[in-house]
Amino acid sequence: MRINIRGRSLTYVAATIGILGLIAGCGGSDDQPATSPASPAATGTTLSAAHETPPAHPVETFTLAASDVTFPAMVPSQLPVAPSGFMRRWGVYETAMVWAVDRPELEMRLITGWEMDSDGLGWTLELKQGVQFHGGWGEMTAEDFVWSFEDEIRDGSIHSGIGLARATGAKAEAVDIYTVSIRLDMFNSFFFEAFFGNGSGASTKVFSKKRIETLGVDAAFLDLSGGTGPFVFEKWAQGDEVVLEAFDQYHGTPSRLRTVRILEIKEPATQIAALKSGQVDASLVPAPLAEDVARDPSLGTLAFGVPGSQRLYPQGQFCMETTLAGEPVEPYPRPGYDPSKPWVGECNDPVSQENARKVRMAMSMAIDRQSIVDNILGGFGRPSYLPEVLPPLLDTVWQDRWFIPYDLDAARKLLVEAGYPDGFDALIRITTGSHPLEVEMGQAVAQFLGALGGEVRTEVLTYSGNRPSVVARERSDLWFRSSSAGTAEPPELTQLRRNPENAFNPGLEVREPLAIIRRMDSITSRDEIDKIREQLYDGFSHNQWIIPVVLADQILGINTDRILEWKMTTGSGYLGDFENIRFK
């Protein structure tokens, strides 16, 4: 539909979700894209133009401002999640499947088809033939796919998919030169999209095995060759710039661009100055600067990708003495367990737990979410009522019963019932490093909670500075956590699966939601998984274990005098898909 964003008329395509039941014997082909039952589809964001075949020898250069071009590590097991996303979305490394631009489905990229095994515990993938690795490392084969997957999940790996792969006993095997078999010990409805799509931190990117064997791990760590995508890394100067060049032997539709330059510019105001001067063609824009950018007749702004979740963690809800598997949780009680905190309560006292639930609900009802969207985000966002659930999945599963009204009178009544007629004192720790307005949003939440009575203080610290105490389960205060962008993966895959065995959780160890998610892992029916998902979200809505606040849009500033078209999928929150950029 046509919308006007801050005075600039752009086209925004909001694709509906497409979820196909994943059942034994179903599969995909080149003309039949596939999804898994737990997989949301992506929303495509497009600057529209008529279709035109890319030129045989493109000459255009596109320049993007970025706040961080940290060198990633060119070995799967050593890849942190953010740089891993850059490598994929920038078009250098590829996954088996990708979210389509023009329809809410996964489409083939490095495979030509797949089939689920008859027992539902594995898949056979048919690889695309003739795919060449950058740098002359030869054709991609099943051995490369298997090696890439196995290196991701080996001992010592920091890859974000290692937990899910090990929990399911995943193993990969090269059946023949172009056929890969993936087998699990237990069914998991999230595995397919997580590893074979491009919308998850667990996504498997295919590296050249020969490259690693020839160079050795240490040299391969720094070597820029070995991808299969439409672009080749020509330069990666950490703290300065990344340069991509079109790959002439690319197996798919060739790029419309010859060169992409990604410049590290730390300060948002400096990025905007570079955009206005023509030094860069596009950059992210903080909400306070969006109006200024949109007033420039040569520039435009639009919301893109998956918005970031801004939420309040009522920490200290540590009520699991054993894991779901029955293993003792050590230490127990957790250092941060403090039942005197109004939002925590005594784990083994149902009355105390109900009072703590009422306090959390009162806090949630005291937050004027729309005010934060209007007055802090400048309209680039929306209220959030389900924690960690993002579009497009959110818009598909939404039920009106999950709405949380802004109602101070009702909130105060709940506090009276819970035994806190005069409110309560609290500390909100606000962590930085994800969104330029996270401090302002966190302080607004503190003001809203302060209206219930008591003293609500704030403390601002970096995310990395706060994380050690979270990993150690030492906190029982409130934590306002911000995110810059989301992904298309369902929150049950990671964000809501924070259990005692994970290194990190938001101060929440409660058996009920984890038991529901465990049931979801074994579901093969779309209808059944939707029903169980509703039970999960009902639990989070009723208990407010995590208090959702707002979803903050990412804002892109773009030189509309130069750029006619940029088709982007939103499987992840990173800017990319440069091969689809078309200049006027």
Image: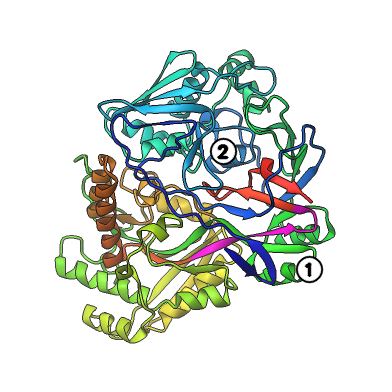
Q: Which mark is residue 144?
A: none
Position of residue 137 measured from the top left corner of the image (x, y, whole percent): 65, 17
Q: Nearest the camera: 29 or 188? A: 29
Q: Is residue 45 shown in magenta?
A: no
Badge nearest the viewer, 1 or 2: 1
**Residue at the image point whose x is 59% and y is 54% from the top:** 45
Label 2's element? helix
Mark 2 residue crowding within 10 angstroms, few (<14) / some (14–19) / many (20+):
many
Q: Which residue position is annotated with label 1? A: 296
Question: Relative to 541, does residue 404 appear above or below in the rendering?
Answer: below
- Separation of disc 1 and disc 2 at Cα? 34 Å
The quadrant of the picture occupied by the N terminus is: bottom right
Q: Is residue 556 shown in magenta?
A: yes
- Direction from residue 49 to residue 335 in the image, left or right: left
Write down the quadrant of residue 368 in the picture. bottom left
Label whose residue precedes the other's in the sequence (1 or 2): 2
Position of residue 436 measured from the top left corner of the image (x, y, whole percent): 61, 63
Position of residue 237 measured from the top left corner of the image (x, y, whole percent): 74, 38
Q: Which residue position is annotated with label 2? A: 84
